[in-house]
Amino acid sequence: MEQIDLMNIIITEYSDVFQLAKTAEEVRQAFNAKRIVSLLNIGGGQAIEGSFSILRLFYQMVDLSHVSTQTTIDPLNIRQSPVIFSHSAAYSLCNHTRNVQDDVLELVIAQELQKTIKP
């Protein structure tokens, strides 16, 4: 929580350089404004310290870096929050099991497109 607090302070203090993004649209806005996109993520379950209230806070941005293909697909089927792959590459670009399979990336793109064209 202290690290997130510190990042929020830095992002606020240097808002001409950094922009917090929680959605794909916010990433596009930051890119267009020529700001560094700041995506907050939590690695490891120890960060919640056994607290469901902290878990609910972290639920607002789901990071699926370095998880199995099925572990990636499961939250995509039930998610309400955006997902990110904060430190993974596309499997077709870097053939390593810890990277995101191309069919999973296509699923994410398809879901995002569906959200943008719904009335």
Image (cartoon, rainbow, N blue to C red):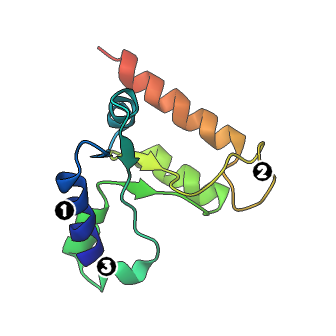
Residue 66: percent from left, percent from top:
61, 63
Q: Quadrant of residue 52?
A: bottom left
2 vs 1, front mark:
1
SS at badge 1: helix
The span from disc 2 to disc 1 (Cα, nearest Å) is 35 Å
Query: Residue at the location (25% across, 42% down)?
Result: 16
- Callout 2 touching callout 1 (CB < 8 Å): no
Q: Quadrant of residue 93?
A: top right
Identify residue for label 1. Answer: 9
Front-lying residue, 63 or 74: 63
Identify residue for label 2. Answer: 94
Identify residue for label 3. Answer: 48
Query: Residue at the location (61% across, 39% down)?
Result: 105
Q: Which residue extends farthest right?
A: 95
Q: Is residue 56 visible?
A: no
Give, as a three-letter code, the residue at label 1.
Ile
Which mark is first along the chain, 1 or 3?
1
Q: Quadrant of residue 13?
A: bottom left
